[in-house]
Image: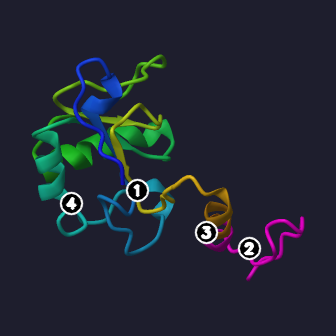
Amino acid sequence: MSIVPLDPASPASHAVGIDFDQTLVAHDKGWQDGRIYGAPIPGAIASLHALAAVRSVFVVTARHPRFHPAVAAWLTHHCGLEAIVDNDPERAYWLGRCLLVTNKKLGAALYIDDRGLRFTGDWTTTLTQARHAIGLTADPHSGELDRTS
């Protein structure tokens, strides 16, 4: 993994993006129509505090924006940190002291996500791993899209 040091000339280096669902909050009962019922994943809150002490932190969610206030409320309740909803359609970076809830992939030194696939410069390996992760088993160069289930 490459190191991204804090650089005054790079706004992206000042932030860390963290996925919400199944990274900060558990989903023991599935989706449940968007309700947030899960408890924090063990270690998530302490880690969030540790990261927020040294970088700006934003929480990324694929949830519809109507759920973003509930995500911010959950974060404030469980973390004890102020969390706000991103209402800026032009935002590209987050340099704030509180947590930002957004559905945008903002510039960041690092992303923490339960479904991430790290690209290491080798598309052959990456494509094989991606196909496996989405349930495809055929040769990636055959044009076939056989599903495993």
Disc 4 and disc 3: Cα gap in Å? 26 Å
Label 4, secondary structure: give it: helix
For the residues carrying marks 4 and 2, which lies nearer the camera in this image? Answer: 2
Q: Amino acid at mark 3?
A: Gln
**Of 68 and 24, the residue lying toward us:** 24
Q: Earlier in the sequence, mark 2 or mark 1?
A: 1
Q: Which residue is mark 3?
A: 129
Quarter that holds the C terminus = bottom right
Cα distance, mark 3 to mark 2?
Answer: 10 Å
Say which of 8 and 63 sits in front: 8
Q: Residue at x 84, y 69 (%)?
A: 145
Badge 3 local density, few (<14 within 10 Å), some, or many (20+)?
A: some
Number of other residues with Cα within 10 Å of mark 1, as a class: few under 14, some 14 to 19, many 20 or more? some
**Rendered image: mark on residue 136:** 2
Q: Is residue 123 magenta?
A: no
**Residue at which label 4 appears:** 44
